[in-house]
Amino acid sequence: MDVLVKLLHELGSNQYHDEQYIGGMIMPRLGIGLDCCVIPLRFGGLSLLQTTDFFYPLIDDPYMMGKIACANVLSDLYAVGVTECDNMLMLLGVSSKFTEKERDTVIPLMIHGFKDSAEEAGTSITGGQTVLNPWCLIGGVATTVCQQNEFIMPDNAVPGDVLVLTKPLGTQVACNAHQWLEQRNDKWNRIKLIVSEDEVEKAYHDAMFNMARLNRTASQLMHTFNSHGATDVTGFGILGHAANLAKQQRNEVNFVIHNLPCIAKMSAIAKACGNMFGLLQGTSAETSGGLLICLPREQAAKYCAEIKKVEGNQAWIIGIVEAGSRTARIIDKPRVIEVQTLEDGTVQSVPPTTTPRRTIKPNVEQQKPMLPEIQNQPNNNLQQQHPQTQQVTNIIHSVQQQQVMQQAPSVALLTPVTMHDQVQQVIVQDPQQYQHHQQMQQFQNHHQ
Amino acid sequence: MDVLVKLLHELGSNQYHDEQYIGGMIMPRLGIGLDCCVIPLRFGGLSLLQTTDFFYPLIDDPYMMGKIACANVLSDLYAVGVTECDNMLMLLGVSSKFTEKERDTVIPLMIHGFKDSAEEAGTSITGGQTVLNPWCLIGGVATTVCQQNEFIMPDNAVPGDVLVLTKPLGTQVACNAHQWLEQRNDKWNRIKLIVSEDEVEKAYHDAMFNMARLNRTASQLMHTFNSHGATDVTGFGILGHAANLAKQQRNEVNFVIHNLPCIAKMSAIAKACGNMFGLLQGTSAETSGGLLICLPREQAAKYCAEIKKVEGNQAWIIGIVEAGSRTARIIDKPRVIEVQTLEDGTVQSVPPTTTPRRTIKPNVEQQKPMLPEIQNQPNNNLQQQHPQTQQVTNIIHSVQQQQVMQQAPSVALLTPVTMHDQVQQVIVQDPQQYQHHQQMQQFQNHHQ
């Protein structure tokens, strides 16, 4: 695939993340490499932002698959802080292997799901292309035209920033485990001692609803809390996308990931499967994953509190930005945060049952995300702020107290509650290789 | 496929060709149904126009296939008179059946062809999506943002207009015949008494270069000569697209097609194959076909002369617009115009060899397109115009003289030079059915 990778790069080489002088204004331009292209237009400081994505069904619910495909395409716009999509096109491949009945059942449901999510996002579908294809295929194109203050270029991270993730990882593991369960195959036999059928069903449903969830609120709040840039987590895995984002930065920074929020039980399955998924190495492909957002340290907890207030869903502080050479890594023993969807539909960390921390403030959930590398500077300003930040304040204080109690100053504090013997520090050199690998794996799993 | 057709319509039902009041302006809006969506934007009378298309290789030259895919996507913008594309995305499916060597040879060539055509069109590719797929797949997305005077809504045909076509028909027939020749199969045995191997090779190359040719000049001249609307001829065939265009019209008009310019020998092959292609019925799928343009009668010949002057290629007056109920038809015995690409690369009608007309003005090529339904009103104004319209004037005079000599007033005059026994008047009721049928056929031909 080297030739292809080289050529794809060549395609974008003359427009890869630079600026352009148009009509007396310096306009940002973003080509191949990140989620969404940013093209300066001839008209009064306006830019064209657009993205396309298509893939193959990975769940067995056509309606939800349509919703996921739509959420996945829009996510690339959301990653640059664009919350209004002007237009969508739908890409559809009708499987030539469908019976007529399958086709007439599945395809309308898929279209309906796609359409419903587009409406939820405040946009609509005005065209597209439908072909016959051996494999069923769904995707789309999302486009917006906006002013410079309406999008956030993903290149302004500074040392000291904090990384936030808005959806749990593990969608690929969950979808695969569910398939193994249905097929009762050798792989299922390998994991059935670790997870129950109910746990796999639950994880699969959680994955489905997480994938179908729009990153729109996450995107809106990027503006409110002064994000320095973001990306959405999809085929490259969390580490691949972190590395991609790091490569785009203006400042010489590294991204260091400490926490891995994962759909409950997925890390256990991943460990049981050796290196098959790379979930704990950060390379497991996600579909329609969360936004990975750089935020100023003082804004990160507020961001998480606000998204919880607006949507009900938890977001997690998962790492830090430090001075470096524009790479990304996961620390030696990252903390896995187990995450589940509650009955009210909100996504939350699982309260601990077996390994309570030594010191807990009674009004703080134990597994709330830890704010990495606080350097023991209590942020007393928070005390005087609006009541809605009270909870955040508590979290931060809790983290700080834990740090103080453990008498260690920095990242080393972030020892995971769950220990992972074989998790190594991984630096992604070529995320496209990862994507290719992951795609291969995904196809093999789903289209044999 | 009825369910799908219905659903696709439903998707666009609330935005199908209407107007929208935005910021004090009436803005046109075009949804699903024609080549390109037109979406009014929030900003100062600007509109977003975009389109997507992807399909499977139908020729065996990857570089040319890339060029064709790019020309085919852009053609939808060109059909609405847009000549500047702001951005392109490329959609690519790498066949999972490729050997590594095939993949590393074919894919870069295809990308290169696509890129070269994009550059020829003055645009560039800033993103896209690549997947593994059983069938190799290529396509793209073309987007532009422009003011209202930069595009031409395809809905202003009036009775008396003339229909012009800018590329010959028969690309599907040519590609299939070439494949039969290579495979020396039963179908080849059926046609080899009618065409020579050289003629099939020639037709295939002509088809390839016609498909790769941009409709950009054709689009530019739509403005110069006051086009009332256009569409590009692709999967539905000439009649399917004419019917689609007719359905969109504000005025109650019918489109009547009298002439069918076809790549040389393709009508003979089509006739030998019965109803397999539907070339002479107007339903043979084209790939990256020409623009079918409604022009005021007095502009049509000038349009053809100007495109010939600028590009060297011939365009043909193929029909008329008359009062009617927004349908399209081909007359009972349409005239087939045989077309070939000359050594200088220009596309021209083949001079007649066997059936000379009775009366020919010496300075006029016999097979120049005939202007239908002139109603014997000599357009003497043309005589006083710029020298470059002299040739056009001659054509028109020639047509008029022929009409006069044959002593018949109207359409009946346009008896084809080549007679087709079995050509019936066909009215397309549901072009999407045709497209589906044609796609099925195309896939069956190319992907067994």
Image (tube, coloured by chain):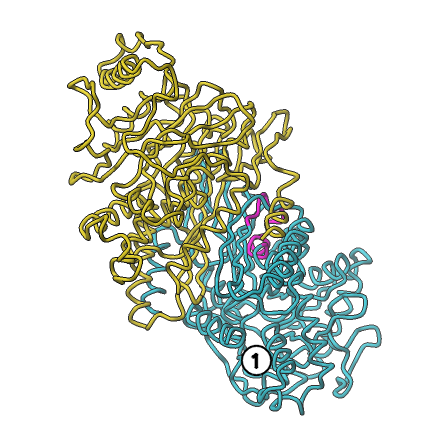
Chain colours: A yellow, B cyan
Would you identify the image quadrant in which residue B410 lies? bottom right
Image vertical order of residue B79 relative to residue A73, above or below? below
Q: Is residue A31 left or right of residue A151?
A: right
Check the picture and name the quadrant holding the N terminus of chain B.
bottom left
Verify whether residue B84 appears in magenta. Answer: yes
Callout 1: chain: B
Residue B148 in the image: x percent, y percent?
54, 43
Q: Is residue A413 left or right of residue B173?
A: left
Residue shown at the point (72%, 81%) measured from the top left: B199
Give the tally of numbered discs. 1
Q: Nearer the viewer, residue A408 or A78?
A: A408
Residue that badge 1 annotates: B280
Image vertical order of residue B33 relative to residue A254, above or below? below
Residue B177 in the image: x percent, y percent?
62, 80
Residue shown at the point (32%, 9%) measured from the top left: A378
Which contiguous range is marked in magenta? B74-89
Verify whether residue B309 appears in magenta. Answer: no
Most extreme residue toward the right is B362
Q: Is residue B21 visible?
A: no
Residue shown at the point (63%, 28%) measured from the top left: A23
Would you identify the image quadrant in which residue B178 lies? bottom right
Residue A375 in the image: x percent, y percent?
38, 13
Q: Is residue A285 visible?
A: yes
Q: Nearer the viewer, residue B161 or A69?
A: A69
